[in-house]
């Protein structure tokens, strides 16, 4: 125990709040340091003096004056005597509770409207996925723009809303499809 | 307002066939409309609170006004008390808060009181009403010195010192009254005692 720890523990020692081991350490320090013992003794003496300070009594006119003030308060029209605390809803006053309710309802309504896919309009244009020409590139997680795709991008940028491009390309199947009649 | 005014003249320390009610029982009775229970509570607490508030503000008249306000608040706001805390904690909190407010007001007004003037400020000496013995003079001197030392403590130290060393409340109750953690109360009491020791070392 050092000097600072000793000073911090003085009140706990005087109020019997220390554990047995702490008390022993405190007393060991006090026995070695006479200055510490003097400090504890003088604090104890001060505590006794403070405890022995004379009690202060209310004057004889205290009760009649209080009686008058109570009567006055009762007759006062502007200031009512509170018989019940104001009602609260989950800790909110009615005003704040209604404001909170309105805010929560607005928040939920806006949230539902903004939620993706919740109420998508029928004529929504599909979002650009980064791969217009054909099947998605499975090796890449994210669409990238390289030299080969520039042309596609340029084409896409000319009319990004034209979704028939894909269909037009898919119809050029001349070399791959052979009709049954041709084979005969 | 047709409520009957409390009978403040008779001190009913023991009500209803010598049953001694606890503070919490009394406030519960008062909340149900028993005005005698209010009088009993006022009698129980007026002097305790007077000591607490006087040591706090160092002005007898002001202390009495604060206690009047506290008791009036108890009357007008009786339903604010909830039986989750001790009644003493609640009433000390009200008195302490009113005292602090009054001290703040006083600070802004900066009124100089004769009793607060130093001897060099006084133009005249107040005549003593009776001859005093050395012992009385000595004890008055000590009391004044201690009171002055308490007044020199910062407000948060002063409150805990009065509640602990004069009112002899427990650490737990003080913690609830001043609304700070138990550890903070202990630390404040310790530091306040060290500061008081420093100011009163020439007393013995």
Image (cartoon, coloured by chain):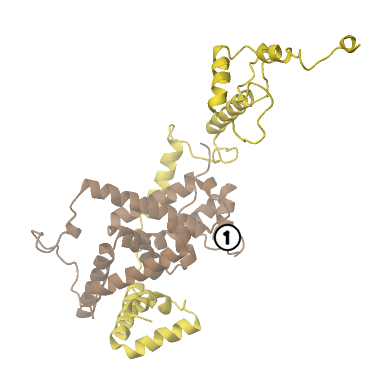
Chain colours: A yellow, B brown
Protein chain holding label 1: B
Q: Position of residue A125 (x, y in %)?
A: 63, 16
Is residue B160 depicted above or below A146 in this figure? below
- Can residue B44 be seen in the rendering of this structure? no
Q: Position of residue B61 (x, y in %)?
A: 29, 54
Which residue sits at x=15%, y=59%? B117
Seen from the viewer's position, the closer of residues B161 and B95 is B161
Q: Which residue is mark 1?
A: B15
- Quarter of the view holding residue B123: bottom left
- Quarter of the view holding residue A127: top right
Which residue sits at x=37%, y=50%? B98
Asked whether, in this view, residue A172 is left or right of residue A80, the answer is right
Q: Position of residue A149 (x, y in %)?
A: 57, 24
Outermost residue, bottom direction?
A: A32
Is residue B131 depicted above or below A69 in this figure? below
Count of numbered badges drawn on the protein: 1
Which residue sits at x=27%, y=57%? B59
- Can residue B108 be seen in the rendering of this structure? yes
Outermost residue, top direction?
A: A181
Q: SS for tag 1?
A: loop
- Quarter of the view holding residue A40: bottom left
Asked whether, in this view, residue A57 is left or right of residue B114, the answer is right
The quarter of the image holding the C terminus of chain B is bottom left
Asked whether, in this view, residue A61 is left or right of residue B198, the answer is right
Asked whether, in this view, residue B161 is left or right of residue B136, the answer is right
Q: Position of residue B164 (x, y in %)?
A: 41, 68
Seen from the viewer's position, the closer of residues B72 and A44 is A44
Pointer 1 local density, CA inside 10 Å: few below 14, some 14–19, many at least 20: some
């Amino acid at each position: 125990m050092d000097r600072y720890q000793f000073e911090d523990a003085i009140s706990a020692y005087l109020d019997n709040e220390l554990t047995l081991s702490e008390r022993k350490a405190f007393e060991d320090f006090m026995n070695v340091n006479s200055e510490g013992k003097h400090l504890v003794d003088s604090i104890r003496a001060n505590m006794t003096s403070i405890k022995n300070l004379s009690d202060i009594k209310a004057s004889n006119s205290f009760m009649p004056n209080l009686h008058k003030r109570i009567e006055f308060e009762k007759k006062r029209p502007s200031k009512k005597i509170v018989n019940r605390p104001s009602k609260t809803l989950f800790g909110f006053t009615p005003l704040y509770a209604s404001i909170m309710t309105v805010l929560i309802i607005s928040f939920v309504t806006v949230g539902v409207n903004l939620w993706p896919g919740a109420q998508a309009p029928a004529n929504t244009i599909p979002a650009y996925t980064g791969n217009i020409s054909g099947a998605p590139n499975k090796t890449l997680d994210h669409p990238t723009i390289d030299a080969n795709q520039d042309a596609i991008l340029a084409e896409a940028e000319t009319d990004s809303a034209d979704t028939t491009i894909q269909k037009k390309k898919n119809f050029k199947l001349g070399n791959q499809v052979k009709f049954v009649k041709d084979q005969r | 307002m047709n409520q009957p005014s409390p009978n403040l003249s008779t001190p009913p320390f023991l009500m209803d066939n010598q049953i001694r009610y606890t503070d919490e029982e009394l406030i519960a009775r008062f909340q149900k409309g028993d005005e005698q229970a209010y009088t009993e509570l006022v009698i129980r607490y007026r002097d305790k609170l007077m000591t607490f508030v006087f040591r706090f503000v160092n002005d007898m008249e002001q202390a009495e006004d604060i206690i009047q306000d506290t008791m009036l608040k108890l009357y007008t706001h009786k339903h604010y008390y909830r039986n989750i805390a001790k009644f003493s904690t609640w009433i000390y909190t009200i008195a302490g808060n009113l005292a602090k407010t009054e001290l703040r007001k006083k600070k802004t007004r900066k009124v100089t009181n004769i009793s607060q003037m130093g001897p060099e400020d006084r133009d005249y000496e107040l005549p003593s009403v009776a001859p005093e013995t050395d012992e009385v003079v000595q004890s008055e001197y000590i009391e004044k010195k201690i009171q002055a030392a308490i007044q020199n403590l910062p407000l948060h130290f002063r409150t805990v010192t009065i509640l602990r060393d004069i009112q002899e409340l427990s650490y737990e109750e003080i913690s609830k009254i001043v609304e700070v953690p138990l550890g903070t109360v202990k630390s404040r009491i310790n530091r306040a005692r060290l500061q008081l020791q420093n100011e009163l070392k020439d007393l013995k």
